[in-house]
Amino acid sequence: MHRYVRQEDGTNGMAEPRKIIIDTDPGQDDAAAIMLAFGSPEEISVLGITTVAGNVPLSYTSRNARIICELCGRTDIKVFAGAEKPMVRKLVTAEHVHGKTGLDGPELDEPTMALAPGHAVDFIIETLRGEPEGTVTLCTLGPLTNIGMAFQKAPDIIPRVRELVMMGGGFFEGGNITPAAEFNIYVDPEAADIVFRSGVPIVMMPLDVTHKLLTRKDRVKRMAEIGTRPAIAMVEMLEFFERFDIEKYGSDGGPLHDPTVVAYLLKPELFKGRDCNVEIEVKSELTVGMTVVDWWQVTDRKHNAKVMRDVDADGFFDLLIERFARI
């Protein structure tokens, strides 16, 4: 069982913020996850943001990450562009969900801050080598291409990772891009396979959790009442983003996937799951990208992930709204 432990600074007993790298393909729900981290500086220190092609192509995800930083007044955060396509496959994107830019909805200014020099994969490797072992958490909100490439290029960093908390996969809910596969895993199943075989401690937030976190009108209204520019922009993003899921699932609001990753770091008690073996299907045309979760422990395959299945939805949205109000 991977337990959440605050770091102590060894001087006055105060907990140090948890160091994270956010690997992302923004995406309106990615924006919400990044904003949740920015609204929680006492608990979370964002060492950098790395972008990957996924929801939209890399040029847009790299643009969008900087837009979110500027929207939240965090131009101190370095944003590194990463992989522009999966490790071995052609890129699949999701403009049908997120719009052409990935952040469709609000009127957003083009970013003025520059991308940090260098490749995201090299930043991940250098950061994990440079920080004390077991102090950096990888928070992955998109396809796992950058992480898979980093682990392949520099396997010495794998034991240095404190934990990898990811949004991806699905089991009881099935898939959202094919009947069997969730989008993030489907886009680059080979990278996901590398990550799940790596031995790094993994916490997985699948569709089984995120589909319980609906952006209901009453929740979005509370967000709007914050009244700040970031909060209003987020409301407008969610109103655009949810239209696809409302039509698809017939629900009151759409599922808010990616902020579960950051919420887990802040309040792990909101989530319930169990240690399982998770295998990634990379060969079958029918089920490629499927996360095969041994939930019922019917094999003797070794546990390699803590798979979440339940969540306190009201507590999650209370946390989200409280932290958005701090930005």
Image (spheres, rainbow, N blue to C red):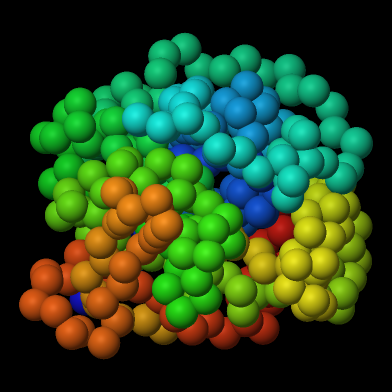
Q: Residue at x 26, y 66 (%)?
A: 278
Residue 106 against residue 315 in the figure, above or below: above
* Residue 201 as seen in the image, left or right of residue 145: left
* Residue 135 as seen in the image, left or right of residue 30: left
* Residue 267 as seen in the image, left or right of residue 280: right
- Quadrant occupied by the N terminus: bottom left
Q: Residue furthest front?
A: 285
Q: Residue at x 81, y 50 (%)?
A: 237
* Residue 139 as seen in the image, left or right of residue 134: right
Residue 7 pos. (x, y %):
29, 59
Residue in the foreground of this view, choosing between 6 and 169: 169
Question: Where, by quadrant of the figure, is residue 68 drawn?
Answer: top right
Q: Residue at x 11, y 35 (%)?
A: 156
Kindly tell me whether residue 206 is visible in this rendering: no
Q: Residue at x 65, y 43 (%)?
A: 94
Residue 220 pos. (x, y %):
83, 68
Question: Where, by quadrant of the figure, is residue 317 drawn?
Answer: bottom right
Residue 187 pos. (x, y %):
47, 43
Q: Residue furthest top?
A: 117
Q: How many marks?
A: 0
Q: Residue furthest left?
A: 300
Residue 102 pos. (x, y %):
72, 39
Kindly tell me whether residue 285 is visible in this rendering: yes
Residue in the foreground of this view, choosing between 164 and 36: 164
Residue 22 against residue 287 in the figure, above or below: above
Residue in the foreground of this view, choosing between 251 and 125: 251
